[in-house]
Image (spheres, helix red, strand yellow):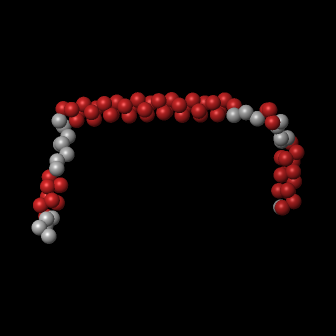
Amino acid sequence: MLGSALHLVALTTASDPVPAENNVVAGWVGAAVLGALVIALVIILRSFTKQLKKVNQAADAGVYDEPSDSADDQTSSTVDHDH
């Protein structure tokens, strides 16, 4: 069993020569993956900017509560300043 596995590895190595340094390229698959990643990035960035515009418009319309200083007022009233 081990002998046949070694024989198979030897045949595979012999039939698949190492390419020359100038023959190694990423190919069309690598270019397609890179292109798909760039397109996905553009779509995500456009969506993100649209959502930020909606948030800014909603903030300007007063949808969100303004941050209050009541938390600061509560902590300052519990502090004893006499000592």
Tell me if residue 35 comes above or below residue 74 in the rendering: above
Residue 67, picture quadrant: top left
Q: Quadrant of residue 81?
A: bottom left
Q: Nearer the viewer, residue 8 or 50?
A: 50
Residue at the outermost bottom position: 83
Q: Residue at x 64, y 34 (%)?
A: 30
Point out residue 51 in the picture as x, y percentages from the top left corner: 33, 33
Which of the two residues, 64 or 68, is positioned nearer the viewer here?
A: 68
Q: Left or right of 11: which side holds 34? A: left
Q: How many marks?
A: 0
Left or right of 52? Residue 35 is: right
Q: Position of residue 5 (x, y in %)?
A: 83, 56
Q: Which residue is located at x 51 percent, y 29 percent?
A: 39
Task: Name the residue at the front extreme.
Answer: 83
Counting from the top left corner in percent of width and height, residue 60 is at: 21, 32
The quarter of the picture where the N terminus appears is: bottom right
Q: Which image quadrant: the C terminus? A: bottom left
Residue in the picture at 76% in, 35% down:
24
**Picture quadrant of residue 43:** top left
The residue lying toward the viewer, choosing from 6 and 31, is 31
